[in-house]
Amino acid sequence: MRGNADVTADVAVADVAVADVAVVGAGPAGMAAAVEAATAGLTVALVDAGERPGGQYWRHGPHDEGPLAGQHGRRTFAALRAGLVRTGTRTFFGHQVWLIARDADRFTLHLRPTHDGRGPGTRTLTARSLILCPGAYDRQLPVPGWDLPGVMAAGGVQALLKGSGTLAGRRAVVAGTGPFLLPVATGLAAAGAEIVMVCEANPLRGWLRDPGGALREPAKAVEGAQYAALLARHGIPYRTRTVVTEIRGEDRVRSVRIAPLDRDGRPRSGVRIEVDADLVALGWGFTPSLELPLMVGARTRLDTDGSLVAVVDARQRADVPGGPGVYLAGEATGVGGAALAVREGRLSGLAAAGDLGRTIDEGRMRRLQRAIRRGRRFAAALHTATPVPPGWTDWLDGSTLICRCEEVTYGDLCHAARELGAKDPRTLKMLARPGMGMCQGRVCGFATAQVAAALTGGSPSTPSADDLLPLARRPLATPVTLGEIAALGEES
Amino acid sequence: MTGPTGHSPRAETTDLVVIGAGVVGAAAAYFAARAGLRVTVVDRGPLAGGTSSAGEGNLLVSDKEAGPELDLALFSQRVWREDLAEHAGLWEFEAKGGLVVAATPGGADALAKLVLEQRAQGIEAVDVPKDELPDYEPHLSPELVSGAFYPQDAQVQPMLVVAHLLRMARQAGARVRTDTEVTGFLRTGERITGVRTSRGPLSAPAVLNAGGTWAGVVAELAGVRVPVLPRRGCVLVTQPLPVMVRHKVYAAEYVGDVASSDAALQTSPVVEGTRAGTILIGSSRERVGFDREVPPPLLAALARNAIALFPFLASVQAIRSYLGFRPYCPDHLPVIGPDPRAPGLWHACGHEGAGVGLSVGTGKLLAQALTDRPTGLDLTPFAPERFEQALPGDEVNPDAP
């Protein structure tokens, strides 16, 4: 039996749908935005690549029963899902937006089924306003052996656990930085895996004991304390200032080399240990998906975590050519987690309704703005406490793959920088092809920019927004068949 | 080469300043440095930051009609295949050949006529009747009427051309300064004696304007007019595939589009595989200034045209698109040689969509001229001052910023 039939993909008869506002992304931010905008009286179309609402954060269990017990914010999810039904929000699930065009006061969104051969094919959606909530994906740092089976992004491990209860391995090392490593480790342990070690690159112990105290974010303090207790209960070794420097194995992961970091964030040579493991979960934070914001021309900036993010004003409005009409919420404006994303989503929905002449509760808007500012401060403090180690490129060797699609090694990048004169990520990309394959740099973009900065800049060197922009810009938001492109414009 | 070399006592001195680290500037720097000149290349951005990195890397003779551009193309062919033969692997030189196809009986007649003319000019061309088309390209549409094969057409990876030519120029003593913008010219009387840059002055008896699509702006800094206009082109890139397209394949109308001066959008299909397995799909020509926003109907036209040639492409995924601005002159000829209106200033720009192919011939000719040797080709048709008398195709520049 299929659950949640009330909000499954709406298979429309017409190919062109019209709405006041199109919300792209049905994660925490997008669901909140759609419910607010619809409650304020707008007609809303909600698009998501997944078959159900919830996004990456609220993942559905194997039987479609919604987020599993124990997931944070389940009640919020249930309330938002009910809100979508109550307001009659039109949903386009199982669809990706691959192109957005702006024409006078209308946005035209071109959709395609996420999975080829399913659904009604290419569709077009037009709207007066656009709320983009594209979320984020795992940020990755290459390490020798990271292309072996058994090495996964921490978010991928989590998705498997949440989505199907599948355990990706038996003996796991969880490594990287930031509080997201904790639910991954405790989730794996609860599902029966042995956690050999959690390697946190930064000195986070104080943070773990009292993560929110100084920042007045009580919910986060409670969450942190819960994870600390869970780590203790499962007897999980948690080491700070420690990184994975090499993953070893022939056909799959067999062992992992671990080293402490020195004061400059470089792995200390000679002090490394090797542990047996069959699963490595690597989490270095998240990279916001900016394809769609950049497609509509949104201005960007560099966030405290080193990610390229979109600029918004106090009402979540993007700075785009062609005047207002584009709102952004969630990780695209800066990685900050689900609770902040929901608030930004709500604010963007309200703002869009207000800008289209609907009456909105200004007091509520101000309360949301205050909460968002608080959430942003917390996120910035967390980013500052969990940087990528400045000396991480030290653990690369010449044969370490940086771009897996195009099989570009660290050695190839060194050659392009040192022999061929590439001094910036874009030139590095054009000469050595990192980021030119199927994923278009989604996996290797951040690492390529970091490597470029390390190879050509001074020390410490971090990529600028100008460095990251050419790696983030994708004229087609998702691969699309030439047949679908050829049909552009035939609908109208 | 003669002339005063010192202007400002603090200016660094060199024999030749090349403005522009694109493919034309790189080729000129390479040949000039090898000819013994001290060369400094400056560019306001990175190497190959403009049109050089926005094309397909074609070295074509098949799309040229009789005239000076064809002469330069054939001259460049020899430079690629002889002077630079030992380096061909560095830039993935591939003598893949070009296949031009006609979709209608009328198109077939026009193509046959073009082939005859081109053969008379020294272009190798093989008539390909309909039933032999699959031998060249097994996945071509069976609707096509005829074709012509051009074995001289080749392809390179243009970014690698630029990077390696500049690397070898550096080995021959040249200096390359990226992120260095030219802000003005040094003069002694009428004579150009160097450039002012964002990183200080450079003094030289010869300054070469290889500014590509922005060469008109550089010329203006020197007080002369070189009417280079941007002509936008857009390319779709597919997912990597096993080899499905063996040659550069394009429709016969392409030749007409290349030679046209129309400002409106023109599209004609150009399809070719690359070493990386992706298939590149062009071509479009339109004069829209430096607008970077690609309207969806343009993408649709590119895709439709390509599918008409290769029906299998309908189900192949495109993963990205890119665009660039061809540096185009009203008479479709590049500007190559010394500028009598500003002694000391030289130009190598306006190669339109053929800059990669023509770059090395241009560079070699310039090095010959700069060192007072006879040039392998008469530069008169490319003279910078030719626009002083208005040409029939000349007009007020609608794309001027």
Image (spheres, coloured by chain):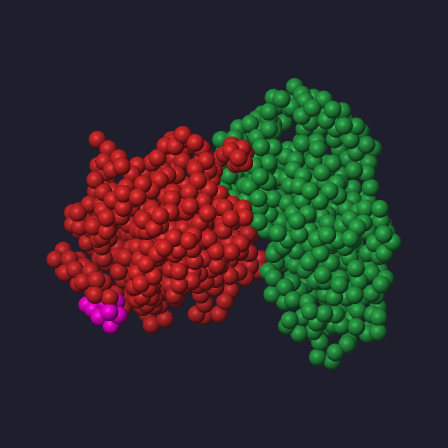
Q: Residue at x 60, y 65 (%)?
A: B179
Tally of numbered tags? 0
Q: State whether residue A342 is above or below residue A166.
A: below
Residue sitting at x 17%, y 47%: A69
Chain in red, by letter, is A
Judging by colour alone, the chain drawn in green in this rendered image is B
Horizontal side of residue B321 vs B63, given as left or right: left
Residue A209 magenta-highlighted:
yes
State which region is magenta: A204-216
Task: State the residue in front, A344 or A363.
Answer: A363
- Residue A426: x and y in percent read 53, 56
Query: In terms of depth relative to the viewer, which is nearer, A291 or B59?
Result: A291
Image spot of residue A331 (x, y percent): 36, 56
Residue A58 in percent (x, y) is at: 26, 47
What secondary structure is the magenta-colored segment mainly? helix
At horizontal 71% and vertical 44% (from top left) the residue drawn is: B263
Q: Quadrant of the C terminus of chain B?
A: bottom right
| Relative vertical location of residue A100 with respect to residue A207 in this rendering, above or below | above
